[in-house]
Amino acid sequence: MMKYFLVSSLILLCTGCATTSVVNRNTSLSPVNSRLWTNELRDNENINRYQVSIQVKDNHITGLCMLKKSDEGWRGTLINEFGIKAFDFIITPKKCKLLNTIAMMNKWYIRNTIAGDLHFLFEIDNPDISFQSKTTRFEQDGILLIDMQQKKSIIRTPDNSLILTNLKRKIVYTLNVI
């Protein structure tokens, strides 16, 4: 089971990277106002479950992310396949805060990078966010690409997989709805 999960994650990652280069090279694309988060991807009432993969250079973390809307924003947790919690997080319109991080990730620069990436991912459709003016959205053949000034990009594939790439730190997050 674990082999198939790893292989499917790698195939999805390679497909996402190939998709990015095709979309970026096409100069006939025009900006769109499509939302990233559709009803199939995120439910505001129930718990949302995602299969997650985080790739950083030679390190690879896979697991489950559970997310629920609360009064203050989105609350979530990331758990690996063995049931060990990597971290909890709270995302408000102003910021994201990581809580209860595991020892290997409990460094300020790691926490800040992941928190910034999660905030970008989960608040990308909020029109009041300051980075909204820095993003450009393109759509082609059911693929939505959101680019933030060559620093971060998000791809939503036709099968509703999300691939967030932090281009500065070379981190790739992949989310699949369960």
Image (cartoon, rainbow, N blue to C red):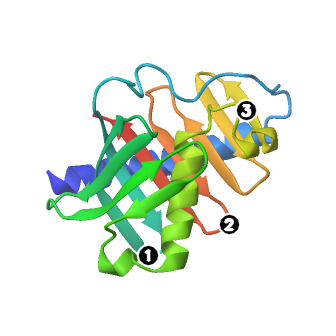
Q: Which residue is mark 3?
A: 137
Amino acid type of the residue tagged 1 in the rendering:
Asp
- In the rendered image, is residue 16 in sight? no
What secondary structure is marked by label 1?
loop
Cα–Cα span, label 1 and label 2: 16 Å
Q: Position of residue 147 (x, y in %)?
A: 72, 44
Viewer-side residue, 82 vs 60:
82
Q: Which residue is mark 2?
A: 168
Figure disc tally:
3
Viewer-side residue, 124 vs 94:
94
Horizontally, is 117 left or right of 82 in the view? right
Q: Earlier in the sequence, mark 1 or mark 3?
A: 1
Q: Earlier in the sequence, mark 1 or mark 2?
A: 1
Q: Which residue is mark 1?
A: 58
Q: Position of residue 101 (x, y in %)?
A: 34, 69
What residue do we see at 48% from left, 47% from top?
91
Amino acid type of the residue tagged 2 in the rendering:
Lys
